[in-house]
Structure formats: structure tokens, C-alpha cells
Image (tube, rainbow, N blue to C red):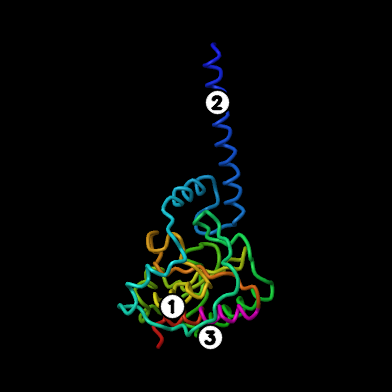
Amino acid sequence: MDGKKIARRTLLAGAAFGVGLAGGCDYEQWRALGPGGIPNTPAGWVRVNWLRLQKSETTDPAPFRPLVGQLGDGRWLKPIPKRDGPRPNVGAHPVPHRQTDQPGSLRGRVAVLDHFDARAAREPGLIEYRMSFFEKHSDAITVVDLARAPEIIKVTQGEVAHIHPTDGSMHMILSPTDAITVLEAGWGERHPLAGDYPNMPLAYIFVYSPRTVEEADVIRQILEAASAYATGAR
């Protein structure tokens, strides 16, 4: 075999090794995010990497503005303070959608869990915990009586909000107007597949993990707004 052929094969072998190594690292990084939505198997990783090509910008409220004042919109969330500091970093993989830093304090996360528990228990027969339609492995605040719920909540089988145990972040479904409030105040961002992935509404909002008990109270207000929107409360 001449020198050129040997060099070419060596180059191709090196490239293949590099791609395999990079893929292996990416796979492990994805699995480290924990379970959520898509099985954390090699086949699930391939599917998620295809979905990465469909990701969109997440912090600009512009996509919601044409929906303000339209059927199904409204304001349930009162003005909230601006969140201090930078937004946390979020994983490159759209599923599971997780923070990679600023995981929140234990006290803040326990306070948020208490708020979720209280909301789930307050109106039996209307709202309760059920298996998350999106996460598939953890409970979510869910509307039981869908008669007065907006159409988008019916599409999500009543799901309103859930917590991610791994990092303390959450997903909530908000009205377009309330989604704008949350994004502009820096408390969350839109899911990168929201509005494009099956049954995932545009206002499927990622709410950051609470770093303090005071931040947990702001999250309580966001959760109350999401619940009021989902139940048709005024």
C-alpha cells in the first residue's frame, strides 16, 4: 500500500475516532441531565439530537405579542420583581430541558414543593397531582375538570406545571400575557421546542430553580397564575 493510501486511511480512522469520542461525551452529558420525556437510551439520544436541529430562541417575548388580547389570553399574574443576576445556563439538549448551573437552595426548593403541594390539595376535584403528560415519570399539577379550561390545556391532558427533581427547575403553561411578564422579568424562558413539538403549547415556560425562599414566593405567584389560567378562573 502506498504512502498516500496509508495516510488517507489513518486520517479517516482518526476522524471516525474523534466523532465517536465526541458522541460518547455528548451521550453521557445528556444522560447526566436525568430522565424526562424521552427515554434516556441510545435511541432516545439519537432522537433528541435530531430535535436539537429544531430548537428556537427562548428568551425573546416577541412570539407571544401577536397573541395578546386574543381568545384564550388574559392577565392572571400581577407585576413581579426582576430576578437578580444572570439567567442560569440551560443544557444544549432540548429534552430533558434542564439547568446546568444555579440549581437553587435546599430551602428554596422545599418551599416551592410546599407551594405545589398546597395548590394540588386546595381544590379537590378540580386540580390534583397526576402523572406528568410531558415528563412521564413524575407528578404534575393537573386540571381534572376541563370544562372551563382553555383549549391548549385540554391538548396537554390538563397538565399545568411540574417540578424537575434533579435541578429544581419547573415547566408551567401560562397565558401569552403572563408568559411575557415572566420572560421580561427574567424568571424563565420558553421551551426551545414550544409551539413546534406535538401538544407543546407556545407558552410552555421553563421557570428557573429558586435560590432563596423569597424567590420561591415569586414562583408561587407564577404557579397561581398558571393554575388560574388553566381552570378559567377570573
Q: Amino acid at mark 1?
A: Asp
**Magenta segment, which residues?**
213-222
What kind of element bears circle 1?
A: helix
Q: Residue at x 44, y 56 (%)?
A: 55
Residue bearing the label numbered 2: 11
For label 1, count other residues whose C-alpha is less than 10 Å away and answer few (under 14), some (14-19) or many (20+).
many
Indicate left or right for 6 with 177 as reference.
right
Residue bearing the label numbered 3: 122
Circle nearer the N terminus (3, 2): 2
Q: Residue at x 56, y 67 (%)?
A: 87
Circle nearer the N terminus (2, 1): 2
The reply to whether the magenta stretch includes residue 53 is no
Say which of 39 and 226 sits in front.
226
Instruction: Give the x, y percent position of residue 90.
Output: 55, 60
Q: Quadrant of the N terminus?
A: top right
Q: Quadrant of residue 208?
A: bottom right
Q: Residue at x 69, y 72 (%)?
A: 106
